[in-house]
Image (cartoon, coloured by chain):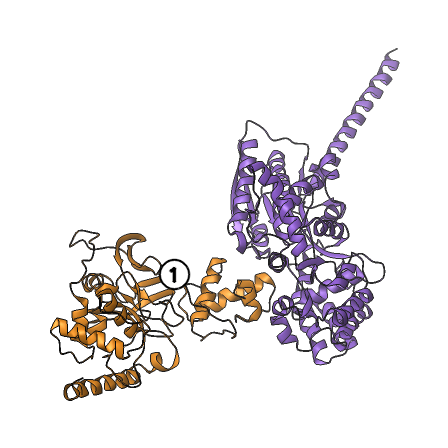
């Protein structure tokens, strides 16, 4: 009898221990490991505790509406503070185009911000400090995030930032160029070249106006044509010399056919003049600011933030002004965005994804503190995303915000649809900091310098080989920042 | 016309005109715009012409010495009107308009409105804003308006509009006399000689009458002169002449087109640190910032596409 009871006791103990171990391993499994810290993503914000979050963000320079971005950011922060009265936020604004050196220094000191804005491309700076956000993303939130945006911030199976928007690259054509109507996502270089030749013979345009000194031009053309970045996620060169020669040959052909000026220096400084004077039918490359200038001057969007042209009640004005201005703008507009030509059947759009990353502190400030930071980051990405997207001609990462984005952007529906299409086939820079830094160097220092040699007679194959060697060299030179 | 007495005065007028051309070669010959010394207006052949003649004609008309066409040309009708005026004022009726005739044309000087109690002096950093549409000059002390004066500004033609921009007082002088009145404060406008000065034509205050300078009643300019030091910032606002943007601007360039570029840069949030018509390192840096933001070739020069971005083309 006693022996039987002993056996039962042993089995019971074993069961308890096994159950405890299972629960313990389950608990450990759901913890997010960040460096030597394990963070429980299920921890909640304690309503009886006060939190202070450090936010580093950037204010976009908007010459047409100065101060507006700062105002929008402050408004979003006010909303957050009202929703979470026990969470205060200290904001530090960095220069818009400042890199990540300040963050890297702060990481070395162990004093990173809790939330860090990355408008010029999300990066995985340091997995020992950067907290993956996927464990904090509800199923609903995940469903309401563009797949391309989520993929862009995901590496090693984890999402490393809350995406704000996807900014696909476009070129701009004159809307009165009839053959340009053929432009659609995935159109080929051959179709592009034929449409340009048509422009010259039938419509009297001279050709296209490029800035070949800007490395982004060749970069975007190559990404669109190949669907790949110059370096992959392991830092190896993705572009073959043959790929590059092929795209360079396409540009050379345009030069030889007189569809691109042979004077690169003059052309690069008079692109806009040629476009507005009706000589050039296309301008490239085009960033968000130049795009704004072209679309505003070309009548696609209003110059001013508020459209005062509609009459009626305030509600009528609010509802009608966008439609009225969009319709009238579409009828008279002179500039329209178009996708880059691709190769074969590929639909590849070079793009950048903006987002907010969360970092842990040293020492770790608590799982609930991290939860608070995640709440802030998610709030900002959802609240600011549509506003920023409307101003930068990006697509918000959250489709439920598209209605608001459509009404705020002022762009015709066809342009917005194009941006959405392109954002869904986005090719974004590598996520890993070191590879992204290498890519930056390739674009800023190698591509423009090499590309412009096409205008002084260098052969596409020579230039392609030069770029290939230079990209391989960058891998050796650019160490982990 | 009494030839014996008129000849010396005519010769004197001719000599003064030649001297002016020599003394102010930049203003007279190369870049249009700017004040010059007041000349003696005499019945010469070919007829003298200019804004000073126009001003004379307008004053004669206002005093009832018509009929004559205010066309800026000192022809026979205007000469005759001057003689009648001189006769009525007891001046030798020779048709030569010199200091005595101008003084007589001035009549009783208009009282300058006193905005502050006598003896009250401004303190702090002083600056001046001239509004050429309101005909006012306002002295600011530490950014707050201290006193406002009525002024005359440049005539509304391409080369006589007052120089809109941000300047500094670089020179102060007393008793130049004649059309400059009792005080002169020269500005660092690079394309001509401009300044704030008194006048012997007090009736012109509150009108567009000058060749670009800012005219004040003598009493007002004497007060202002006693307060503001060399180096005081002077901002002139108002309509600007039509300017073409055909040239590429690089460091070292000066001109009205540079002022336009500087103003526009500042409006768009690119800090050129002033609109002084001089394309210096600050302007070039502001242009570089614009070029970087818009993805243009970055060289600090204002070339054609920069003008398009600035909305100047």
The colour applied to the residues of chain A in this rendering is: purple
Q: Is residue B179 left or right of residue A269?
A: left
Q: Would residue A230 be seen by someone viewing this image from the given angle? A: no
User: Is A141 placed left or right of B305 in the picture?
Assistant: right
Q: Nearer the viewer, residue B306 or A468?
A: B306
Q: Is residue B111 visible?
A: yes
Q: Is residue A197 above or below residue A420?
A: below
At 86% from the left edge and 12% from the top edge, which residue is drawn?
A: A2
Colour-to-chain, orange? B
Tell me where residue A234 appears, x and y as whole percent.
76, 58
Give the quadrant of residue A400: top right
Residue A454, compared with residue A158, is above or below; it is below
Mark 1 secondary-structure assignment: loop
| Quarter containing the C terminus of chain A | bottom right
Between A291 and B61, which is closer to the camera in this rendering?
B61
Residue B77 placement (x, y as % from top left): 26, 76
| Residue lying farthest to the front in this orientation | B67
State which quarter of the image contains the N terminus of chain A: top right
Left or right, residue A474 beside residue B17: right
The residue carrying mark 1 is B238
**Residue A450, image x and y in percent?**
70, 73
**Residue B15 at x, y = what percent?**
24, 86
Kindly identify the residue that appears in the image at 67 percent across and 73 percent down. Answer: A449
> B14 or A263, which is in the foreground?
B14
Residue name at image x 65 percent, y 71 percent: A213
Mark 1, other Cα within 10 Å: few <14 / some 14–19 / many ≥20 = some
Q: Chain of mark 1?
A: B
- Quadrant for residue A438, please give it: bottom right
């Amino acid at each position: 009898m006693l022996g039987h009871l002993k056996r039962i006791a042993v089995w019971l103990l074993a069961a308890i221990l096994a159950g405890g171990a299972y629960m313990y391993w389950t608990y450990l499994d759901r913890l997010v490991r960040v460096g030597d810290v394990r963070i429980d993503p299920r921890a909640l914000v304690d309503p009886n505790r006060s939190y202070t979050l450090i936010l580093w963000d950037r204010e976009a320079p908007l010459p047409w509406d100065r101060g507006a971005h700062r105002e929008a950011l402050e408004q979003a922060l006010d909303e957050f503070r009202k929703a979470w009265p026990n969470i205060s936020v200290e904001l530090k604004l960095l220069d818009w185009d400042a890199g990540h050196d300040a963050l890297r220094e702060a990481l070395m000191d162990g004093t990173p911000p809790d939330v860090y804005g990355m408008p010029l491309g999300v990066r995985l700076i340091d997995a020992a400090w950067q907290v993956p956000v996927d464990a904090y993303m509800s199923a609903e939130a995940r469903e309401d995030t563009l797949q391309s945006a989520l993929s862009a911030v995901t590496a090693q199976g984890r999402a490393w930032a809350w995406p704000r928007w996807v900014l696909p690259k476009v070129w701009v054509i004159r809307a009165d160029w009839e053959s340009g109507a053929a432009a659609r996502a995935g159109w080929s270089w051959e179709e592009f070249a034929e449409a340009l030749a048509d422009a010259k013979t039938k419509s009297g345009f001279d050709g296209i106006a490029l800035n070949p000194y800007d490395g982004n031009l060749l970069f975007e053309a190559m990404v669109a044509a190949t669907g790949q970045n110059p370096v992959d996620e392991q830092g190896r060169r993705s572009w073959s010399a043959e790929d590059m020669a092929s795209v360079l040959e396409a540009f050379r052909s345009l030069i030889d056919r007189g569809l691109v000026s042979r004077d690169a220096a003059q052309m690069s400084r008079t692109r806009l003049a040629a476009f507005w004077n009706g000589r050039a039918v296309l301008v490239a490359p085009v960033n968000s600011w130049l795009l704004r200038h072209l679309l505003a001057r070309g009548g696609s969007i209003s110059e001013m933030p508020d459209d005062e042209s509609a009459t009626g009640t305030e509600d009528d004005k609010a509802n009608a002004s966008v439609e009225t201005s969009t319709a009238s703008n579409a009828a008279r507009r002179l500039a329209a965005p178009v996708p880059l030509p691709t190769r074969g059947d590929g639909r590849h759009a070079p793009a950048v994804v903006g987002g907010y990353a969360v970092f842990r502190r040293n020492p770790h400030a608590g799982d609930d503190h991290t939860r608070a930071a995640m709440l802030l980051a998610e709030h900002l990405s959802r609240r600011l995303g549509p506003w920023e997207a409307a101003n930068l001609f990006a697509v918000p990462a959250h489709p439920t915000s598209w209605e608001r984005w459509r009404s705020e952007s002022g762009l015709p529906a066809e342009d917005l649809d194009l941006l959405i299409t392109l954002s869904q086939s986005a090719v974004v820079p590598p996520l890993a900091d070191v590879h992204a830094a290498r890519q930056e160097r390739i674009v800023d220092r190698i591509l423009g310098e090499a590309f412009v040699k096409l205008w002084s007679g260098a052969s596409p194959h020579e230039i392609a080989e030069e770029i290939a060697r230079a990209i391989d060299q960058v891998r050796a030179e650019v160490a982990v920042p | 016309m009494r030839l014996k007495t008129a000849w010396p005065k005519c010769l004197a007028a001719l000599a003064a005109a030649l001297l002016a051309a020599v003394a102010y070669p930049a203003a007279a010959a190369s870049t249009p715009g700017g004040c010059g010394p007041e000349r003696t207006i005499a019945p010469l052949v070919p007829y003298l012409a200019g804004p000073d003649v126009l001003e004379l004609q307008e004053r004669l008309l206002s005093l009832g010495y018509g009929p004559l066409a205010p066309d800026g040309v000192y022809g026979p009708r205007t000469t005759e009107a001057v003689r009648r005026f001189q006769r009525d004022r007891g001046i030798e009726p020779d048709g030569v308009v010199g200091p005595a005739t101008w003084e007589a044309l001035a009549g009783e000087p208009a009282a300058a409105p006193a905005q502050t109690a006598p003896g009250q002096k401004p303190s702090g950093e002083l600056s001046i804003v001239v509004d050429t549409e309101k005909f006012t000059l306002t002295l600011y002390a530490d950014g707050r308006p201290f006193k406002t004066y009525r002024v005359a500004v440049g005539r509304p033609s391409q080369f006589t509009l007052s120089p809109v921009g941000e300047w500094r007082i670089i020179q102060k002088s007393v008793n130049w006399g004649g059309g400059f009145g009792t005080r002169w404060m020269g500005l660092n406008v690079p394309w001509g000689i401009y300044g704030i000065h008194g006048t012997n034509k007090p009736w012109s205050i509150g009108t567009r009458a000058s060749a670009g300078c800012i005219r004040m009643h003598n009493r007002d300019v004497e007060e202002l002169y006693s307060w503001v030091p060399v180096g005081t910032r002077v901002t002139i606002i108002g309509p600007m002449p039509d300017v073409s943007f055909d040239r590429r601007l690089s460091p070292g360039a000066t001109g009205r087109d540079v002022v336009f570029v500087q103003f526009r840069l500042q409006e768009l949030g690119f800090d050129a640190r002033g609109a002084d018509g001089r394309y210096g390192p600050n302007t070039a840096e502001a242009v570089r910032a614009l070029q970087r933001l818009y993805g243009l070739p970055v060289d600090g020069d204002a070339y054609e596409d920069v003008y398009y971005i600035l909305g100047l083309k």
